[in-house]
Image (spheres, rainbow, N blue to C red):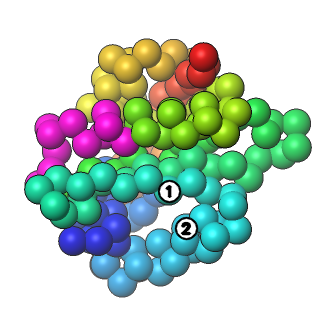
Amino acid sequence: MNLAETLADCVAGGASVGFMWPFPVEEAVSWWDGVIENVAAGKTLLFGAYADGVLSGTVQIGLDGPCNQRHRGDVKKLLVHRRARRKGLAQRLLAALEDEARARGLSLLTLDTVTGSDAEQLYEKLGWTKSGVIPDFAMWPDGRLCATTVFWKKLG
């Protein structure tokens, strides 16, 4: 399994992560090529997690904000393949992300997620603060609108 397969699996499972059905693995490969370019350029940090020796989860920090926002990072695309869920991968990915953000001197992280999702519950459990809900902010892969919850977390 690779990152493209994990992304395609999340979209196939109905995750609202920026892509619409149908979403073949080939499109996921192309999208990841852009992410890798941003990693190489220092604009993004990429984390991966393994379950049973297989790459099954990922998350990113966007570092390419304006000059007056270089103290913070945007958490992007927390993805865990459906076969590897409920094994603590998301929690481990976020812990590694927060540790690296602190090591790089970041003092604030922000993110958004689908309102009412398992991810929303995870962020609350891990001490993220809910900023608010934006109705009809994004779409499910089938085209239905969904609300988005915005979170932030101060790093100590």
In this picture, is 6 found above or below 110? below
- The residue identified by callout 1 is 46
Query: In this rendering, would 121 be left or right of 151?
Result: left
The C terminus sits in image quarter? top right
Q: What stretch is highlighted in magenta?
A: 82-93
Earlier-in-chain disc, 2 versus 1: 2
Do the residues under discs 2 and 1 have CB atoms within 8 angstroms? yes
Measuring from the top left, give residue 136's x and y in whole percent. Answer: 49, 38
For numbered disc 1, what is the local secondary structure? strand
Inspect this view and state whether residue 61 appears: yes
Q: Which residue is rendered at x = 31% and y = 78% of the image?
A: 25
Q: Is residue 31 or residue 16 the one in the foreground?
A: 31
Disc 1: CA contacts within 10 A as few (<14), some (14-19) or many (>=20)? some
Residue 75 sits in quarter:
top right
Decide if residue 21 is in sight here: no
Looking at the picture, how far across and down is residue 93, in whole percent? 37, 42
Q: Position of residue 128 (x, y in %)?
A: 47, 19
* Type of amino acid at the residue the image marks with label 1: Leu
- Residue 91 forms part of the magenta stretch: yes
Residue drawn at point x = 26 percent, y = 32 percent: 118
SS for callout 2: helix
- Residue 10, image quadrant: bottom left
Of the 4 image quadrants, the one containing the N terminus is bottom left
Q: Which residue is drawn at 52% across and 77% down?
A: 33
Considering every residue shown, the one lying at the far bottom of the view is: 26
- 146 within the magenta span: no
Residue 80 in percent (x, y) is at 27, 51
* Residue labelled with disc 2: 35
In the figure, is residue 125 to the left or right of 71?
left
Is residue 7 positioned above or below 51 on the image? below
Q: Which amino acid type is shown beneath numbered disc 2?
A: Val
Near-viewer residue (129 or 138): 129
